Amino acid sequence: MILRIRKQGDPVLRMRSVPLKKITKEISTLVKNMLETMYEVDGIGLAANQVGLPLRLVVVDIGEGPIVLFNPCITEHDNEETVGREGCLSIPGLTGEVKRWEEIVVHGMAENGLGCERLEARGLLARVLQHEIDHLNGILFIDKAKDIRKEQVEAEV
């Protein structure tokens, strides 16, 4: 099911998301729906609060297959930062240059609810994970962007 993506100005986007205590059937359905929604709008990442639920859950796919993270937390990062242009499904038509760590390590709850997953990421994957984890903390890319540009949106014919 395609979910409605919340837009800038919706208070849920500024909320700090709450941790998941366990992975229920409802959460598994939410993950499926979030992935379907992300693919439908050609996104590469989506946080649960972007679909109106302030839960610590993100889905990501940079073209290498879907990654689902429950209660993700950046536990390590390198000291190298890079600047890249970012956009956001919740702020259509705007992009900005954002400084992010080049390499990170993310920990989160395993899908079975037991133990912990560890994910090492660099480059685009690291950037997308930082962007989505920021969402879980009520932070939007425009809060960090050095410049904001209105992008040309092609009219659909």
Image (spheres, rainbow, N blue to C red):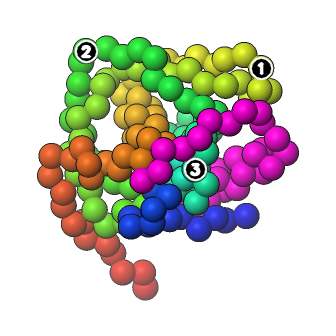
Please tell me in which quadrant of the rendered image residue 115 appears.
top right
Residue situated furthest left in the rendering: 147
Q: Is residue 109 above or below residue 92?
A: above
For the point 44% across and 41% down, which residue is it?
137
Q: CA distance from mark 2 to mark 1?
A: 31 Å
Q: CA distance from mark 3 to mark 2?
A: 30 Å
Residue situated furthest bottom in the rendering: 157
Q: Secondary structure at mark 2?
A: loop
Q: Amino acid at mark 3?
A: Pro
- Mark 2 or 1, nearer chain start: 2
- Residue to which mark 3 is pinned: 54
Say whether residue 20 is magenta.
yes
Q: CA distance from mark 1 to mark 3?
A: 22 Å
- Mark 3 or 2, nearer chain start: 3
Please tell me in which quadrant of the rendered image residue 88 appears.
bottom left
Label 2 crowding class (10 Å Cα cut-off): few <14, some 14-19, many 20+? few
Residue nearest the observer in this picture, 33 or 54? 54
Pair 2/1: label in front: 1
Residue situated furthest right in the rendering: 25
Q: Which residues are magenta?
A: 14-41
Residue 38 shows in this picture: no
Q: Position of residue 3 (x, y in %)?
A: 64, 64
Q: Which mark is residue 79?
A: 2
Report the quarter where the C terminus lies: bottom left
Pair 3/2: label in front: 3
Please tell me in which quadrant of the rendered image residue 69 appears.
top right
